C-alpha cells in the first residue's frame, strides 16, 4: 500500500541460541533454535511508530527445514501504541516423494 509514508527502518541481530528437542507433527526432532531480535521504525505521515521485533526459528539441521516459527511484534506510537501480534507457524506433516523407477 502506498500511503506516502517513508520506508520502514529495521535493525536485526541473529543468535543461534542452542540445540533443542521439540515435538512437531508427533515426531521428536533435534533442532537448532535461532533467535532474531530487532527494532523497527516507520513514520506514518503523522508520528513515528516504533516496533520491537522478536522471531524464533527452530531448524532441523539435516533437512535444513524450519519446523517451527514464532513471531512477536510490539508497537508504540500514535494509534498503534500498545498493539501486539504473536503468531506461531508449525510443520504439521512431512511427506516424502516416492522414488521414481526407470
Image (cartoon, rainbow, N blue to C red):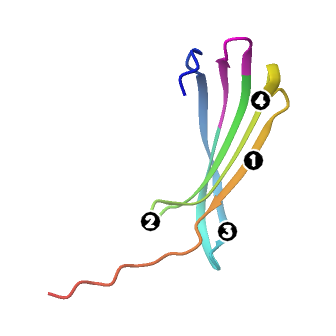
User: Residue 30 versus residue 70: which sits nearer the camera?
Assistant: 70
Q: Quadrant of residue 28?
A: bottom right
Residue matched to label 2: 63
Q: Earlier in the sequence, mark 4 or mark 3?
A: 3
In the picture, the disc for residue 78 is: none
Q: Earlier in the sequence, mark 2 or mark 1?
A: 2
Q: Secondary structure at mark 4?
A: strand
**Mark 3 to mark 2 CA distance (whole Å):** 15 Å
Q: Earlier in the sequence, mark 1 or mark 4?
A: 4
Q: Could you tell whether 67 is left or right of 80 in the image?
A: left
Q: Residue at x 69, y 56 (%)?
A: 88
Q: Earlier in the sequence, mark 2 or mark 4?
A: 2
In the picture, the disc for residue 75 is: 4
In this rendering, the answer to whether 70 lies above or below 50 is below
Stretch in magenta: 37-49
**Mark 3 to mark 1 CA distance (whole Å):** 20 Å
Quarter of the image where the C terminus is located: bottom left
Q: Secondary structure at mark 1?
A: strand
Residue matched to label 3: 22
Residue matched to label 1: 86
Q: Position of residue 84 (x, y in %)?
A: 79, 39
Q: Secondary structure at mark 3?
A: strand
User: Residue 76 versus residue 13: which sits nearer the camera?
Assistant: 76
Amino acid at each position: 500500500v502506498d500511503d506516502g509514508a517513508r520506508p520502514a527502518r529495521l535493525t536485526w541481530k541473529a543468535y543461534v541460541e542452542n540445540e533443542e528437542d521439540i515435538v512437531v507433527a508427533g515426531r521428536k526432532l533435534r533442532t537448532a533454535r535461532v533467535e532474531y531480535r530487532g527494532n523497527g521504525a516507520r513514520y506514518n505521515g503523522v508520528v513515528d511508530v516504533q516496533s520491537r521485533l522478536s522471531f524464533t526459528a527452530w531448524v532441523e539441521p539435516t533437512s535444513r527445514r524450519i519446523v517451527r516459527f514464532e513471531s512477536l511484534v510490539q508497537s508504540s506510537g500514535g494509534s498503534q501504541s500498545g498493539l501486539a501480534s504473536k503468531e506461531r507457524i508449525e510443520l504439521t506433516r512431512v511427506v516424502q516423494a516416492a522414488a521414481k523407477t526407470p
